[in-house]
Image (tube, rainbow, N blue to C red):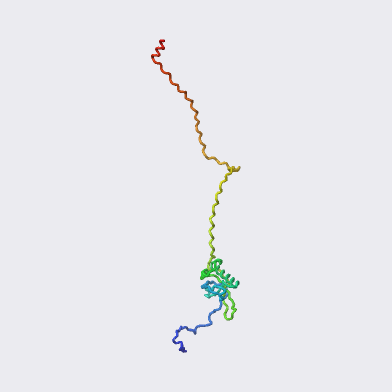
Amino acid sequence: MNYPEYEDDFAFDNDMGSVDENAGNYGPMPAGKYGMQAVEIEVKTCKEPSNGKMVAVTFQVVDGSNNRKIFENYCLQHTNDTTKRIAEQAVKQWMKACGYTGNERLAARLLKTLEGREFTAHVIVEKSKDPQYGDRNRIRQFEASGGYAPQQRPTPAPAPQQRPAPVPRSSGPPRLPSNNARPRRNTRTPARPRPVHSPSPPKPPFRPAPPAASPGNAAHNLTG
């Protein structure tokens, strides 16, 4: 068969005759537990801009059974409180399954750190309400499976205890020892007594010697 209008076009050289267009199952995965991780996280505006922002996440199976993907939208900002609460509960479960406590301040930068962290997903099959679209998989619950331990907040160091100020001594009478108090033992060596010296007797008063007699006086005394 000749297609003159395509003669100058690029040919892919694919053998389309050997392709079975009905082969393969592109329906949802069977419900069950799968090892998964987030491969793409994006913050988008909700369909109704007045509802605020939502987080669009692409999850992929990583346990070797297949490489199928599940797409989830979490409306963390919404005018409907129930819709917002369901999204918050799912995101908190996801965070805890990836090693966080779930009580962290929720921000886009924190959510981006969840990419590549493995967890176990409880996958269900959700029936489509629109006949134009088929059934699809949804993640109903998150569990830890990647060995991530919850990150605990560091415990603040206790404040140093200040010593109480010394209490001034009172000027009252001294305390008397109690009856039960043991007397202190005197360990000092007693001093040796000093020798007592008796007083010396008083010296006699000094008396000058009488003058010696001259020779003349002595002769006069003999003749007279």
* Residue in front for this viewpoint, 11 or 44: 44
Evaluate whether residue 5 shows in this view. yes
> Residue shown at 50%/83% (left/top)?
19
Q: Is 18 rendered above or below residue 68?
A: below
Pick out the residue farthest to the left.
215
| Depth check, front residue: 79 or 190 | 79
Q: Could you say which quadrant of the image residue 136 lies in?
A: bottom right
Q: Is residue 117 visible?
A: no
**Residue 42 placement (x, y as % from top left):** 52, 73
Q: Position of residue 207 (x, y in %)?
A: 45, 21
Question: Residue 181: x percent and y percent?
Answer: 59, 43
Say how many tags the image has: 0
User: Residue 154: x, y in percent?
Assistant: 53, 62
Which quadrant of the figure has residue 184? Answer: top right
Q: What quarter of the picture does the C terminus occupy?
A: top left
In the picture, residue 96 is in which quadrant? bottom right
Report the side of 210 relative to 189 (left or right): left
Front position in the image: 154 or 168 = 168
Image height of 78 relative to 132, above or below: above
Residue 178 drawn above or below residue 84: above
Answer above or below: position of 150 versus 47.
above
Q: Residue lying farthest top?
A: 223
